Amino acid sequence: MWKLFTNLNKDESGQDLIEYALVAALIALGAVTSMKSVSTAIGTLFTSISTALTAA
């Protein structure tokens, strides 16, 4: 049983996959954060355009 745990501890076959998953998760988090700020800016822009067209 101890040998099984020692072999599992030394096994690094899934390490690359975990690292890629963490990088993908960080990229996704950054994309969601930036999309929120961009959507707010676009909403503000459309509101100002709508106000300008209504006043004209």
Image (cartoon, rainbow, N blue to C red):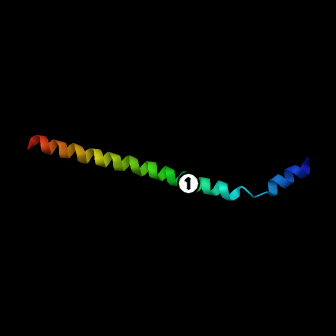
Q: Residue drawn 43% across and 49% down?
A: 33
Q: Quadrant of residue 46?
A: top left
Give the amino acid type for the residue marked by disc 1 in the picture.
Answer: Ala
Q: Quadrant of residue 54?
A: top left
51 is higher (above) or lower (below) than 38: above
Residue 11 percent coordinates (x, y): 79, 57
Which residue in the rendered view is the most extreme toward the top? 54
- The answer to whether residue 16 is left or right of residue 3 is left
Q: Residue drawn 32% across and 45% down?
A: 40
Residue 16 percent coordinates (x, y): 67, 59
How many tags in the picture?
1
Residue 49 percent coordinates (x, y): 19, 46
- The answer to whether residue 35 is left or right of residue 3 is left
- Image quarter hosting the C terminus: top left
Q: Residue drawn 45% across and 52% down?
A: 31
55 is higher (above) or lower (below) than 5: above
Q: Residue drawn 61% across and 53% down?
A: 21
Dot 1: within a 10 Å radius of its alpha carbon, few (fewer than 14), some, or many (20 or more) residues? few
Q: Quadrant of residue 43?
A: top left
- The answer to whether residue 39 is left or right of residue 23 is left
Which residue in the rendered view is the most extreme toward the left? 56
Residue 10 percent coordinates (x, y): 81, 58
- The answer to whether residue 31 is left or right of residue 11 is left
Label 1, secondary structure: give it.
helix
Q: Name the residue beneath numbered marker 1.
A: 24
